[in-house]
Amino acid sequence: MRQAYKALPSTSVLWEMFDYKPLTGELVLKQPAPQHSTKGRKKHIYRHHKLNGFGYKTHRLIWCWVTGEDPGQDTIDHRDLNRHNNAWNNLRKITLERQAWNKGLQKNNKLRVRGVQRVSNGSYRARIRIHGKGYHLGCFPTIEEASAAYEKAFLERDHYR
């Protein structure tokens, strides 16, 4: 379930409070404030900053600091999948669906191949999901052929729009 959107502080407030180093991805507090804390619980997978009692993901604050725009319901994605790499060239604003393409394999994927399932007759079925709609790409005698069909559809996914 999608989290409720929380508006970010204004750009002028962020510029007043922070300096940003785009090559290293560090968001540095200019002067300590009693309401500010960078401490997070160990379960957090993203870096957080706490401002005025609210926690914000650091990469979202950086996006607002650099562009002057609150990303709203859109997602700020890390291109290299490293959630702690907040360098500017590693951040991009995308939709949730586009972010799903950037995910790795599911842990329960027994074949270790994306978009391929084994069918009861011993063949392999290739499927892809685009805009919430599933597309059957065919059944193939080998896992390599099914994987190639998925990869081809993945590269041509704009064709399905």
Image (tube, rainbow, N blue to C red):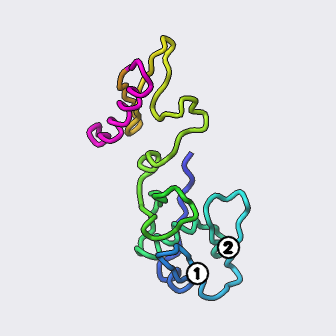
Say which residue appears at 64% left-offset and 69% top-offset. 54
Front residue of this view, candidates 151 and 66: 151
User: x%, y% of residue 95?
Assistant: 42, 52
Say which residue appears at 59% left-offset and 67% top-offset. 56
User: x%, y% of residue 16?
Assistant: 53, 86
Give the numbered dot on residue 48. Answer: none
Say which residue appears at 53% left-offset and 83% top-offset. 19
Image vertical order of residue 128 relative to residue 88, above or below: above
What secondary structure do most residues of the magenta stretch adopt? helix
Q: Quadrant of the N terminus?
A: top right
Residue furthest bottom as drawn? 31
**Quadrant in the rendering for residue 33:** bottom right
Residue that label 1 marks? 28
**Quadrant in the rendering for residue 26:** bottom right
Is residue 21 covered in magenta? no
Q: Is residue 59 left or right of residue 34?
A: left
User: x%, y% of residue 140?
Assistant: 39, 20
Q: Is residue 31 left or right of residue 21?
A: right
Q: Secondary structure at mark 2?
A: loop
**Quadrant in the rendering for residue 132:** top left
Q: Residues within 10 Å of mark 2 (few under 14, many from 20)?
A: some
Range drawn in magenta = 139-161
Q: Secondary structure at mark 1?
A: strand
Residue that label 2 marks? 38
Residue furthest top as drawn? 121
